[in-house]
Image (cartoon, helix red, strand yellow):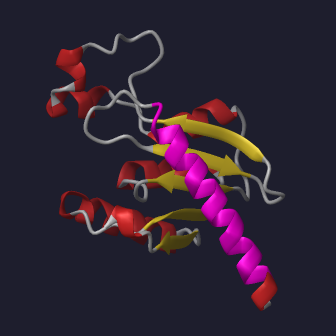
Amino acid sequence: MSDTDKFDRQKWDMRFIELAKHIASWSKDPSTQTGAVIVDQRRRIISVGFNGLAQGVEDRPERLNNREIKYKMFVHCERNAIIFAGHPCDGCILYTWPFMSCAACAAMVIQSGIKRVVAPYSENPRWVEEFKLATEQFNEANVEICLLNIPECK
């Protein structure tokens, strides 16, 4: 890849990461808002998603503020984006904010046909094991991972 192509790719990666960050702000999660953008190889947006409760399920404070309940009920941003795409995402790129996919979402990303994942690099100790398992799956399935060094995501 030429230097010009690399610069162009980085420019588009940052644009779509910024969009994923914006999409994350739509989440009602009081602790961690996540966003996802899926684009095809021609940089067309295929789908977006943010974390939250399923359609028609009430965003009640006792659900949103209780992690044990929330983790069981929430649909992750990647899953929402894949579901809303409505068709396979063969060869597409997934952008997530503010960190990469968990292990369960990584499996869905792989199954959907996505071939590249871009996310901010995160050292969040709560998610280290999830990120390791997700990375292992992506590597085995030949899904390219690009972790961006964005200071606000450390």
Q: Which residues are magenta?
A: 5-26
Report if residue 53 lies within the magenta region. no
**Relative depth, front residue between 110 and 121:** 121
Quarter of the picture holding the N terminus: bottom right
Q: Between 79 and 136, which is closer to the camera in this rendering?
A: 79
Q: Is residue 111 visible?
A: no
Q: Report the residue that reaches farthest toward the right.
A: 42
Classify residue 42 as left or right of residue 34: right
Image location of residue 141, percent across then percent down: 55, 68
Front position in the image: 84 or 154: 154
Q: Measured along the vertical axis of the image, is residue 63 above or below residue 75?
A: above
Residue at (72% x, 82% y) in the render = 6
In the image: residue 76, left or right of residue 22 = left
User: Residue 74: image x %, image y %?
Assistant: 34, 30
**Residue 103 image-quadrant placement:** bottom left
Q: Residue at x 80, y 90 (%)?
A: 2
| Secondary structure that dominates the magenta span | helix
Across and down, in percent, residue 131 comes to: 34, 64
Picture quarter with the C terminus? bottom left
Q: Is residue 94 left or right of residue 34?
A: right
Position of 1 with respect to 142 (left or right) is: right
Q: Is residue 128 visible?
A: yes
* Residue at 40% over, 58% down: 99
- Residue 22 within the segment the image draws in magenta: yes
Q: Residue furthest bottom?
A: 2
